[in-house]
Amino acid sequence: MSLIQIKDLNKHFNVLNRREGLGGAFLDLFSGDYNIVRAVDGVSFDIEAGEMIGYIGPNGAGKSTTIKMMTGILKPSSGAILVNGFPPHANRIRQAQIMGVVFGQRTQLWWDLPVIESFKILKDIYRVDQKTFDDHMGLFNELVGLKQLYKQQVRTLSLGQRMLCDITASFLHNPQVVFLDEPTIGLDISVKAKMRTVIKELNQTRNTTIILTTHDLGDVEALCRRIIIIDKGKVLFDGDVKKVNALFGAYRTLKVQVNDFDESTLKALAGQMIQHFGTNNGISISEVEKHWTDITIDQARTPLADVLSFVMTNFPVHDVRIVEISMENVVQKVYDGALS
Ligand SMILES: Nc1ncnc2c1ncn2[C@@H]1O[C@H](COP(=O)(O)OP(=O)(O)O)[C@@H](O)[C@H]1O
Ligand SMILES: [Mg+2]
């Protein structure tokens, strides 16, 4: 039996279309002019014990809503969900013993207490014995130097420090499955790297199943073998991360700032690119803001370096930046059939 089984899962929210002003508010009381938001819309997947899954998609895709149903915080509108054989919302206390969860946007620690006191409370709540507790804290001290933070009040921690503490807390009772909802949002590269080390270590040494939601493809690339891409409540892709990496790892966006740029320059640039690199060159160009142009390049067809040198020699380039493909781009390309 799979650890997590999800079949035709739906969560629909009724959202009142609010009218403006006091009169509007009065009318809203009587006529239910509702919109249905299909936050999760017919999702099915199974997850095996020990897997580390990247559950990814743009903002508003339905990731957190799915996590909330898996953790029992929300009851599904319809469909089936079983974690370790039970529906999570039916017995939240039993389920809490086998789960850990981190929501990147808020903390499960006590704001006014020193870090170590929060951990001691959780130790009691989950009835963790002293040795397990000491071993766990020791491991996190080794991995991320947690001890330095013990005496600090939670409210005084930086975002990155707080996230590390929250992750420590979520694994404290050695749960079978840990849900990490955007644990790296807003963190700088070095803290992200620490976070990834910790998550990987725990998955490998304790065989903890981990569901990681993120809109950072770097997290997924570093950690997950399998990814599920979701958008508008529906699963667009479920499979090997390598397939996605092979495809999207190839895409880069070259951002160029050109002096005296206008629409005719953009047209000229597009025309010359086609002349130089051919029509099937994997390059698309769009002006995103004044003077800045995005050139998206599929390196499987044209190397970035060639495009860069071409642009530099033929246009009065003021500044350039190179960025990885964004989650929004990935999703668009999946819709366009990139993975089918
Ligand atoms: N409690 C709620 N009431 C109404 N709409 C909601 C609620 N929670 C989430 N939504 C909507 O459901 C959709 C999915 O949200 P969410 O699961 O938070 O997305 P994600 O975590 O992928 O960014 C969004 O359109 C969001 O506005
Ligand atoms: Mg979310």
Image (cartoon, rainbow, N blue to C red):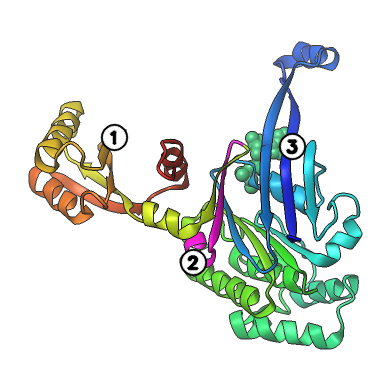
Nearer the camera: disc 1 or disc 3: 3
Q: Position of residue 79 (x, y in %)?
A: 77, 40
Residue 77 found in image quarter: top right
Residue on which disc 1 sits: 286
Q: Are marks 2 and 3 in contact (CB under 8 Å)?
A: no
Disc 3 residue: CB within 8 Å of ligand 1: yes
In this view, 145 is above or below 157: below
In the image, what residue type sits under mark 2? Ala
Q: Residue at x 81, y 49 (%)?
A: 73
Label 2 C-beta lies within 8 Å of the nearest ligand 2 atom: no
Instruction: Confirm or deny contact between disc 1 and disc 2 (CB under 8 A).
Output: no
**In the rendered view of the protein, which quadrant contains the C terminus?**
top left
In this picture, residue 338 sits left or right of residue 283: right
What is the distance, in whole Å, between disc 1 and disc 3 at their CAs?
A: 37 Å
Q: Tag 2's secondary structure?
A: helix
Give the secondary structure at mark 3: strand
The segment highlighted magenta reads 219-232
Query: Where is residue 87 drawn, in percent x and y?
Result: 84, 51
User: Quick one: label 1, few (<14), some, or many (20+) residues within 10 Å?
Assistant: some
Q: Characterize the local packing of mark 2: few (<14), some (14-19) or many (20 or more) Cα atoms within 10 angstroms.
A: few
| Magenta-drawn stretch contains 221 | yes
Q: Which mark is residue 11?
A: 3
Residue 119 % position (x, y): 79, 74
Mark 2 = which residue? 222
3D distance between C-alphas at marks 2 and 3: 30 Å
Q: Is residue 289 visible?
A: no
Residue in view at x 74 percent, y 32 percent: 12
Residue 152 percent across, percent down from the top left: 71, 75
